[in-house]
Image (cartoon, rainbow, N blue to C red):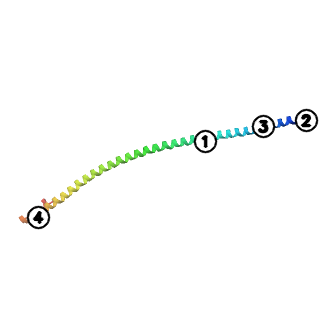
Amino acid sequence: FARLPRLARKSKISLRNSFATISFCFFGYILVKNAIKESHYKERLEKEVAYRSKKLEIARNIAVVRAQEAEKAKNLAEERAREINKRKEELERFYKLTVGRELKMIDLKGKIKQLENTLTKDSNTQVPEENKK
């Protein structure tokens, strides 16, 4: 029986060591598991950041292209507006010339009529029909 207490003490130490070893293994497992989980999460976030950065770059390129197209369209519209204004000015000049000519012709016809009337009253003669136009 003398050996029994010694064996019991040894088994207590052995139990403590076993418990400590199991505890360290358990907590080590949890820590490694969390480290792996965080690593996977970090990789997923990095992929998401890369994906969004790529989308942002594509959107920026599209915006640049659209801005260039808008600038070209604006320049084209301004050029066409200048052409239209030039054509409008030409048409206005032509209109003034033709209207002025027509007014002058009406005025001259009136003077011719007036001169014919004066001529017929003065000479009491009729102007031959072939001269009237």
Label 4 or label 3, whichever lies nearer to me, is 3
Left-right relation of 40 to 65: right
Q: Read off the residue under disc 1.
A: 45
* Lower sequence index among marks 3 and 1: 3
Q: Read off the residue under disc 3.
A: 20
Label 2 or label 1, whichever lies nearer to me, is 2
How many residues crowd mark 2 within 10 Å: few (<14), some (14–19), many (20+)? Answer: few
- Helix, strand or loop at label 2? It is helix
In the image, residue 56 above or below residue 118:
above
How many residues crowd mark 1 within 10 Å: few (<14), some (14–19), many (20+)? Answer: few
The reply to whether the C-beta atoms of the residues labelled 2 and 1 are less than 8 Å apart is no
**What's the distance in space between the residues labelled 4 and 1, CA to CA?**
104 Å
Q: Amino acid at mark 3?
A: Ala
**What's the distance in space between the residues labelled 3 and 1, CA to CA?**
37 Å
* Lower sequence index among marks 2 and 3: 2
Q: Amino acid at mark 2?
A: Leu
**What's the distance in space between the residues labelled 4 and 3, CA to CA?**
140 Å
User: Is 3 in front, or is 32?
Assistant: 3
Which image quarter: residue 4? top right
Left-right relation of 18 to 72: right
- Helix, strand or loop at label 1? It is helix
Q: Read off the residue under disc 2.
A: 4
The reply to whether the C-beta atoms of the residues labelled 2 and 3 are less than 8 Å apart is no
Label 3 or label 1, whichever lies nearer to me, is 3
Q: Amino acid at mark 4?
A: Asn
**What's the distance in space between the residues labelled 2 and 1, CA to CA?**
60 Å
Which image quarter: residue 122? bottom left
The reply to whether the C-beta atoms of the residues labelled 2 and 4 are less than 8 Å apart is no
How many residues crowd mark 3 within 10 Å: few (<14), some (14–19), many (20+)? Answer: few
